[in-house]
Image: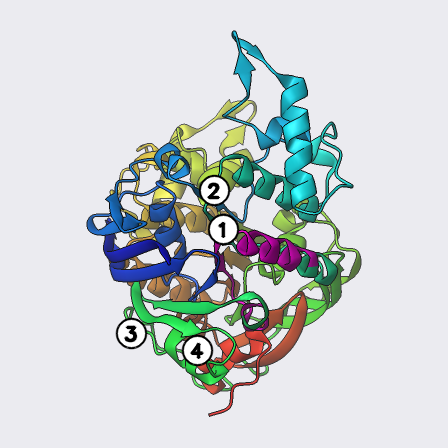
């Protein structure tokens, strides 16, 4: 019996069409898996289903009846619960308080804590986790324990469909096996599960049917999860349209003989990645490809000193680099992080102040600060990057995503960085600005800056990088010239599935 059916779903954001005529049908009591590369539209689709995004076109039917889901509360009221990869639990509250967060049991204006604890206990028992105490503070639980608490919350809401977004990304193998046991228990009671994952082996084990998105469109709907050939699934996920022109790369071997600017040997961060080796030469772009949770961003953060390595060595121009952000910045490293708004920018301050932040001492003499010198220096770099509007006194939070990213890059050019670490450089950047940012990145490399690039979008890594490092679950599985790789080959490597033509 069809529980939820989505037809003709479309969603437009400024500069990009995220969903285009998407179809999805989920049966009661089944595990329906949703596949697609990063940027294929999976997150947008489940946010439409969760009431977090309103679709521009299309219809959602529940038990055959059209429904509107204008907000998450409406989705929950209809029995749809979504567990995002970043769980929305409050660490300082108890397990029982988190299970009933937002829908506390109360009588006469007083919260019935004893009743909530008793009901939470029943829900955890139903999930087979008698060992989790309802009085325990959620912040002390493991990632797997927190996930079970979130599932208990979904059951407390009488969820008929539970959406799980990359639920195994932070779990060990035994914890994944336990999660699957819980999922099977839920579906045996008629609860439907929409399971989002990149791991094909998991989909074969837990899934009943699988649908595939590519470029915001449904390219496969309701295929049998266990018997559809891996090659068919990967072929449907790849073959993406070429949307952005990439600047020409130097000829093969152009960087041979140039000095190594950044070198890493045996770099390890326990729990994230291990024994990573690579080097980046002057003017070279090294791309890192891998899934969320593969250790990509953690490698950049460790090189930058934001995380302390468990083992290994980082060399800058042949000399060991001391741990810590201060040492990295003094040595000539710059980081443009994944979340630029929360991690890189002072959104209510000017472009000039954001760009000059690491270099402010240059403009102070004898206790006096020269605002004119600061403005002149910043303007030189923002003009070179064609930042728009050109007014460096403008509040940076009012700029577009692409121009905010240019402001972050300008910061490190002003500082005089020799190595630029770019984590998801085009996230939140509209279509028109992407090609412009690609040009900026290639121009920086051509000027001699060594670049380490992380991106969830394989075409971006393969189109921009000179060489590519492929990570899978914290381990380097291959390193090759970007020209020798294609999307299908890289996806094969990071999914740990051998594709047979």
Residue 495, numbered circle:
none
Q: What residue did someone put label 4 on? A: 233
Which mark's residue is nearer the viewer, 4 or 2?
A: 2
Of the image marks 2 and 1, the number of the one nearer the N terminus: 2
Residue 191 numbered tag: 1
Give the camera-side residue of 290 and 140: 140
Inspect this view and state whether residue 385 appears.
no
Separation of residues labelled 2 and 1 (CA atoms): 7 Å
Q: Provide the residue designation for mark 3.
A: 241
Q: Local crowd at mark 4 within 10 Å, few (<14), some, or many (≥20)? A: many
Q: Position of residue 317 (x, y in %)?
A: 66, 65
Disc number for residue 159: 2
Q: Residue at x 49, y 52 (%)?
A: 190
Magenta segment range? 178-203
Callout 1: 10 Å neighbours few (<14), some, many (20+)?
A: many
Closer to viewer: mark 3 or mark 2: 2
Residue 382 shown left or right of residue 296 in the figure: left
Q: Is residue 226 magenta?
A: no
Residue located at (50% from left, 76% from top): 491
Mark toward the start of the polypeptide (3 vs 2): 2
**CA distance separating discs 3 and 2:** 37 Å
Work out whether residue 102 can be spotted: yes
Front label number (1 vs 4): 1
The tag earlier along the polypeptide, 1 or 3, is 1
29 and 280: which one is in front?
Answer: 29
Closer to the chain start, of discs 1 and 4, is 1
* In the rendered image, the vertical position of residue 231 relative to residue 160, given as above or below: below
Q: Position of residue 29 (x, y in %)?
A: 48, 57
Q: Position of residue 3 (x, y in %)?
A: 37, 53
- Is the residue marked by circle 2 packed among few (<14), some (14-19), or many (20+) residues within 10 Å? many
């Amino acid at each position: 019996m069809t529980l939820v059916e989505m037809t003709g779903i479309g969603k437009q954001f400024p500069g990009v069409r995220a969903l285009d005529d998407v179809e999805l049908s989920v049966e009661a009591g089944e595990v329906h898996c949703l596949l697609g590369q990063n940027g294929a539209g999976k997150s947008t689709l489940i946010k439409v289903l969760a009431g977090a995004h309103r679709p521009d076109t299309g219809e959602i039917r529940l038990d055959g009846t059209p429904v509107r889901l204008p907000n998450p509360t409406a989705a929950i009221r209809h029995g749809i619960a979504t567990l995002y990869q970043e769980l929305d639990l409050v660490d300082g509250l108890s397990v029982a308080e988190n299970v009933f967060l937002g829908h506390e049991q109360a009588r006469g204006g007083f919260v019935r804590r004893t009743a909530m604890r008793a009901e939470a206990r029943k829900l955890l028992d139903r999930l087979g986790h008698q060992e989790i105490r309802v009085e325990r503070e959620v912040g002390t639980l493991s990632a797997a324990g927190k996930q079970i608490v979130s599932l208990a919350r979904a059951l407390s809401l009488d969820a008929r469909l539970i959406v799980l977004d990359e639920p195994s990304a932070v779990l060990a193998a035994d914890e994944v096996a336990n999660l699957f046991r819980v999922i099977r228990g839920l579906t045996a009671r008629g609860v439907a599960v929409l399971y989002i994952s990149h791991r094909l082996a998991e989909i074969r084990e837990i899934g009943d049917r699988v649908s595939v998105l590519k470029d915001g469109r449904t390219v496969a709907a309701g295929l049998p999860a266990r018997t559809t050939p891996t090659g068919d699934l990967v072929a449907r996920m790849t073959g993406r349209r070429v949307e952005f022109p990439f600047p020409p790369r130097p000829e093969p071997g152009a960087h041979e003989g140039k000095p190594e600017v950044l070198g890493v040997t045996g770099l390890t961060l326990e729990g994230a990645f291990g024994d990573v080796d690579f080097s980046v030469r002057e003017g070279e772009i090294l791309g890192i490809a891998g899934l969320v949770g593969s250790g990509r961003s953690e490698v950049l953060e460790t090189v930058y000193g934001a995380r302390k390595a468990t083992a290994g060595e980082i060399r800058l121009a042949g000399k060991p680099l001391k741990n810590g952000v201060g040492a990295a910045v003094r040595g000539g490293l710059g980081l443009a992080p994944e979340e630029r708004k929360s991690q890189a920018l002072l959104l209510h301050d000017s472009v000039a102040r954001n760009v000059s932040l690491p270099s402010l001492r240059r403009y102070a003499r004898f206790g006096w600060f020269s605002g004119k010198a600061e403005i002149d220096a910043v303007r030189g770099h923002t003009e070179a990057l064609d930042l728009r509007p050109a007014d460096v006194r403008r509040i940076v939070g009012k700029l577009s995503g692409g121009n905010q990213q240019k402001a972050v890059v300008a910061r490190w050019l002003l500082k005089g960085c020799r190595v630029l670490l770019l984590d998801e450089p085009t996230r939140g950047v509209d279509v028109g600005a992407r090609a412009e940012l690609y040009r900026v990145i290639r121009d920086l490399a051509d000027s001699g800056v060594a670049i380490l690039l992380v991106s969830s979008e394989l075409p971006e890594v393969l189109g921009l990088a000179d060489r590519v490092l492929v990570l899978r679950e914290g381990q380097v599985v291959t390193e090759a010239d970007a020209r020798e790789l294609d999307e299908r080959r890289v996806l094969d490597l990071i999914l740990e599935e051998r594709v047979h033509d």
